[in-house]
Image (tube, grey):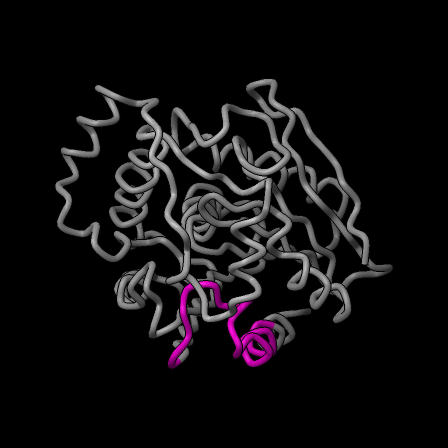
Amino acid sequence: MNLLHRYFINSDGLRIFYRKEVPYNPKGIIVISHGYGEHSGHYLDLANFLVQNGYGVYIIDHRSHGQSEGQRGHIESFFDFISDFHELMSIVRSKHPQDDIFTFGHSMGGLITFIYGLMHSEYDIKGQIFSGPALGAPWGMYKVPLKLYELLGKTIPKAKIYRVIRKRASRNQQYLKEFEADPFDLKYTTVSYLTEFLYRGISWAQQNAGNYNLPCLFLHGKSDKVIPYYRTSEIYDKIQSEDKTLKLYDHCYHELVHEPEREVILSDILDWLEKRMN
């Protein structure tokens, strides 16, 4: 499968890259939001699976990531991600006015789509899927005072924080090797990026979670060493959705669609989608 490569110009004049593949007469459209430091290329296997099962797929490279424009690894506001995602969703809706539209967000991408669902619940979203969503502080960060993030963001916003090897993200060693060698993945992010993500983005989602009411599927590995699975359970209990499902996977790490159990996880995703089609 060769996904088409496209760009749109966002409200800040930046070229935002996305990939798309839509079969004839699709069952629905899935718009995918990648995680922290990643890009759309991490989700080609997921896209292929969805297309083979009759769904169209769009995958964004968030600004400052992958092949999109913007200062590498730096953002001024976390809500710029949500704005860009909304612009892509508007493109998708204009091209597929009669089709059901779902979102899939992994890790930070899940935080982006969760906030998007809160801010644009009127936008006719059929449902949302969250994979290891960053809806709470990562392991080892929950004791960091929120005010410290705010202080650092104001004093040294463009200082670079280099990433460590992500051995704790997955048990799939081949995936980890490809991840480390990928030229489109971020090798560092700025203090401003982390402050906006871990302080402003997560705080806003937690404070407003009680207003969330869309159909949703939450997926999380019980052995996730990046985002504790109980963070997802806490948000799940807060939301008001009448149609909500939580699936926890024993032994699975953070990168669910790349874990050894990925066939089970993909099957669960497809089953959830199929039950919500007209």
Residue 264 in the magenta stretch? The answer is yes
Percent across and percent down for residue 216 are: 47, 64
Is 108 situated left or right of 261 in this image? left
Q: How many marks?
A: 0
For residue 178, above or below residue 201: below
Q: Is residue 7 magenta?
A: no
Q: Which residues are magenta?
A: 250-269
Is 160 positioned to the left or the right of 106 in the image?
A: left
Task: Identify the residue at image location x=29%, y=64%.
Answer: 228
Q: Position of residue 38 (x, y in %)?
A: 52, 46
- The residue furthest right is 24
Q: Is residue 225 left or right of residue 175?
A: left
Instruction: Give the quarter of the figure containing the C terminus.
Output: bottom right
* Residue at left offset 61%, top offset 25%: 10
Q: Say if 218 sits above or below 88 in the image.
A: below
Instruction: Give x and y (percent) for residue 269.
Output: 57, 72
- Where residue 261 appears, as percent x and y from the top left, is 52, 79
Q: Nearer the viewer, residue 96 or 81?
A: 81
Residue 4 lies left or right of residue 196; in this view the side is: right
Q: Residue at x 46, y 71 (%)?
A: 171
Q: In this rendering, is residue 77 above or below 162?
A: above
Tell me the quarter of the image containing the N terminus: bottom right
In front of the other: 186 or 236 = 186
The residue lying at 49 percent from left, 39 percent from top is 186
Closer to us: 126 or 62: 62
The quadrant in which residue 47 appears is: bottom right
Query: Could you say which quadrant of the image residue 102 lies in?
Result: bottom right
In the rendered view, would you say 250 is above or below 175?
Answer: below
